[in-house]
């Protein structure tokens, strides 16, 4: 019995090994992220793996620098060029700094798309926004409004670094749409550099120097978490609320403590899935990613590409005490 | 010479007081006792790390791996707490100090036994320890809701008006003062850094002293690993990135000579507080975030320039040639 089972396993392994060898020409898609070790990108990788399974014959190379620097990403891109991948899907730490390296990749026949945080137009074929920037800006303002009594009052923004592409776009959108939210008043924008200690200190600074601020909107996961902790430690739960964009697993504690009532995020698994699908179809040649065209992205449906070669995936999703437990287990 | 030291630390106190008064004119309530207590609490971790760093710098070495050590230990402790919520906190703290001391001992051993310059060793272990934190966690975060309430609450539990975190720092400052000024080990660190040749003639094992300085620095970094993770209620790989430079800066501002042998516990504490005051002031006084980094840098350089001048006046070593060779080594 035992021997038979061992033999079976042996045969199965051999078959697997052989099919692997047969698939030596798997399409290699590199998923380049801002930095490794970030829950958001780990979740995106999950989605990418799922897409690879759906498509078949696709190998995902999940990679990125260990810190969020453009220099680190350039090194990663260069090594991917050397490995001869078929497509690169990147979330850029800097829109311009990575362009020369990506152009080099394009010259070698590698199809480059960006997702999450965009690369300048000349460096990529198309860009996949997790959601449209307008929708995110509107979502942040809606969240702020929902936390304020009567939807009126002062709020402040706690961002990541001063050069972060997506943060700045969203903040600009929020400022633009502020006129649609009468009574909401943006007092100031501070920058926590996506470091827990600096974000905490900036939030503490807001609490002391801006006593009128009743809501802190942090469109970044480290920031929203640190601000929630600062509000909790200052004993201001119920007086000052924190909201913004964060991952359910990271925000569960803040929801439980009451520092946050609700927050939003798109689904990073869907994002990684869609980026991989798009990269696959462009690399395969059955889509060109030109503005005005559409790409079929598996279970996410048709993704339409708009002006500047930018596409939007879906609306951000709101999480609160009712659904946090369910989603905090997923990502 | 002692008088001059005293003078220097008093000067630093005066500068910090002037800074606080200056910031208070721009941000209301900055000098309020409650806010000052907040600043001290916020700086506690830096103070503890700076004391460890000071011990190492006194022996004419440098420990660049403290922040990576902190990140690894913090991650290890947080993961243990998340996986075994029943473990008593004391055990976790002992574990943090133990892991930290072990990582410090690796640095110490390489510097002592293999005679590799400490800057090279710790630059290497800096990357290794942070890489290990990554391997350990697989890049995943440990979040607030996964940690036990005791794990999170002890450092912020108020005692006589100050959180436990501040009291831990106070206890370590007193302990550090005792070790540096009253125990043979403390005298040995000053001797090994100030004049290694003379130290050997005096019967001090310079290598061994160096080793234990690294172990001490590592143990304190380990303790801070727990404190950091608990304070910010999250553990991830990038925790405290670049923080080693803050500890070195705190030492340098506090008048601890990078060439070894000169410095005091009070200096390191004041250096850390100096940085803490600036870090806490910048968000509230309404300076553009674009200028903040440059301002912090300028202040540190000014302190170093001042430090270098003060040192020259003292003229501390008689055997110039020997000393010059040692500095290069």
Image (spheres, coloured by chain):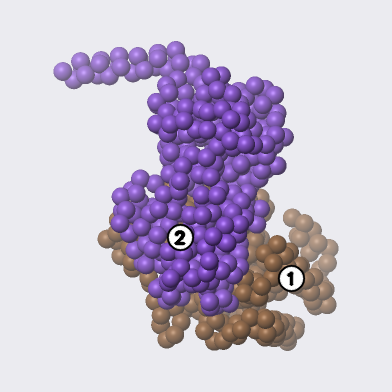
Q: Are marks 2 and 1 in contact (CB under 8 Å)?
A: no
Marks 2 and 1: which is nearer the front?
2
Element class at badge 2: helix
User: Label 1: which residue?
Assistant: B299
User: At 72% from the left edge and 65% from the top edge, which residue is drawn?
Assistant: B291
Where does residue B99 sit, x and y in percent of width and height?
Answer: 45, 57
Kindly identify which chain the residue marked by label 1 belongs to: B
Measure the C-alpha gap from mark 2 to mark 1.
Answer: 39 Å
Q: Quadrant of residue A92?
A: top right
Q: Quadrant of residue A79?
A: top right
Mark 2 surroundings: few (<14), some (14-19) or many (≥20) residues within 10 A: many
Where does residue A282 sit, x and y in percent of width and height?
Answer: 56, 24
A11 and A183: which one is in front? Answer: A183
**Quick check: can you spot residue B297?**
no
User: At 53% from the left edge and 45% from the top edge, which residue is drawn?
Assistant: A132
A1 and B16: which one is in front? Answer: B16
Element class at badge 1: helix
Q: Tell me the tag on residue B205.
A: none
User: Label 2: which residue?
Assistant: A143
Mark 1 surroundings: few (<14), some (14-19) or many (≥20) residues within 10 A: some
Up/down of B43 relative to B10, above or below? above
Chain A hue? Answer: purple
User: At 35% from the left edge and 15% from the top edge, which residue is drawn?
Assistant: A14
Where does residue A87 sit, x and y in percent of width and height?
Answer: 57, 27
A193 and B43: which one is in front? Answer: A193
User: At 75% from the left edge and 84% from the top edge, which residue is drawn?
Assistant: B4
Chain B hue? Answer: brown
Does residue B292 appear left or right of residue A67 in this picture?
Answer: right
Q: How many marks?
A: 2
């Amino acid at each position: 019995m035992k021997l038979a089972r061992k033999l079976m396993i042996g045969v199965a392994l051999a078959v697997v090994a052989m099919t692997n060898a047969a698939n030596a020409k798997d399409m290699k898609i590199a998923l380049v992220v801002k930095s490794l070790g970030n829950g958001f990108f780990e979740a995106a990788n999950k989605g990418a793996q799922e897409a690879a399974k759906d498509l078949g014959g696709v190998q995902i190379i999940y990679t990125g620098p260990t810190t969020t620097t453009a220099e680190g990403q350039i090194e990663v891109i260069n090594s991917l060029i050397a490995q001869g991948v078929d497509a690169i899907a990147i979330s850029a730490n800097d829109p311009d700094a990575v362009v020369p390296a990506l152009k080099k990749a394009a010259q070698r026949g590698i199809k480059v798309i960006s997702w999450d945080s965009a690369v300048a137009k000349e460096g990529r074929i198309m860009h996949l926004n997790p959601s449209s920037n307008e929708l995110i800006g509107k979502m942040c303002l809606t969240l702020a409004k929902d936390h304020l009594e009567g939807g009126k009052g002062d709020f402040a923004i706690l961002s990541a670094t001063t050069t972060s592409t997506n943060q700045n776009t969203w903040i600009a959108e929020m400022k633009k749409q502020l006129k649609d939210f009468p009574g909401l008043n943006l007092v100031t924008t501070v920058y926590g550099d996506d470091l827990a200690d600096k974000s905490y200190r900036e939030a503490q600074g807001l609490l002391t120097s801006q006593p009128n601020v009743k809501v802190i909107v942090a469109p970044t996961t480290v920031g929203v978490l640190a601000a929630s902790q600062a509000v909790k430690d200052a004993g201001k739960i119920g007086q000052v609320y924190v909201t913004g964009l964060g991952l359910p697993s990271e925000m569960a504690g803040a929801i439980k403590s009451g520092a946050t009532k609700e927050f939003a995020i798109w689904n990073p698994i869907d994002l990684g899935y869609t980026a991989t699908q798009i990269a696959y179809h462009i690399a395969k040649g059955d889509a060109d990613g030109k503005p005005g065209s559409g790409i079929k992205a598996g279970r996410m449906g048709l993704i339409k590409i708009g002006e500047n070669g930018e596409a939007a995936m879906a609306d951000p999703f709101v999480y609160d005490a009712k659904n946090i437990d369910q989603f905090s287990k997923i990502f | 010479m002692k008088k001059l030291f005293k003078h220097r630390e008093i000067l630093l106190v005066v500068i910090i007081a002037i800074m606080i008064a200056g910031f208070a004119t721009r941000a209301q309530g900055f000098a309020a006792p409650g806010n000052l207590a907040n600043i001290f609490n916020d700086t506690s971790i830096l103070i503890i790390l700076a004391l460890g760093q000071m011990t190492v710098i006194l022996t004419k070495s440098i420990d660049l791996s403290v922040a990576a050590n902190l990140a690894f230990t913090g991650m290890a402790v947080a993961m243990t707490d998340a996986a075994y919520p029943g473990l008593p906190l004391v055990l976790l703290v002992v574990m943090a100090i133990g892991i930290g001391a072990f990582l410090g001992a690796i640095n110490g051993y390489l510097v002592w036994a293999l005679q590799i310059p400490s800057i090279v060793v710790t630059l290497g272990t800096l990357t290794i320890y942070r890489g290990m934190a990554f391997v350990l966690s697989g890049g995943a975060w440990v979040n607030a809701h996964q940690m036990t309430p005791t794990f999170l609450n002890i450092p912020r539990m108020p005692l006589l008006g100050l959180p436990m975190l501040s009291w831990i720092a106070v206890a370590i400052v007193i302990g550090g003062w005792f070790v540096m000024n009253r125990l043979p080990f403390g005298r040995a660190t000053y001797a090994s850094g100030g004049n290694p040749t003379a130290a050997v003639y005096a019967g001090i094992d310079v290598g061994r002293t160096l080793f234990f300085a690294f172990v001490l620095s590592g143990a304190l970094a380990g303790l801070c690993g727990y404190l950091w993770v608990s304070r910010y209620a999250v553990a991830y790989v990038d925790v405290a990135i670049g923080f080693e430079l803050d500890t070195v800066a705190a030492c340098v501002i506090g008048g601890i000579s990078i060439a070894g042998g000169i410095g005091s516990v009070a200096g390191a504490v004041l250096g850390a507080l100096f940085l803490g005051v600036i870090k806490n002031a910048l968000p509230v006084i309404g300076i553009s975030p674009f200028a903040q980094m440059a301002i912090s840098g300028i202040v540190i350089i000014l302190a170093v320039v001042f430090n270098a001048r003060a040192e020259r006046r003292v003229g501390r070593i008689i055997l110039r040639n020997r000393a010059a060779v040692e500095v290069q080594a």
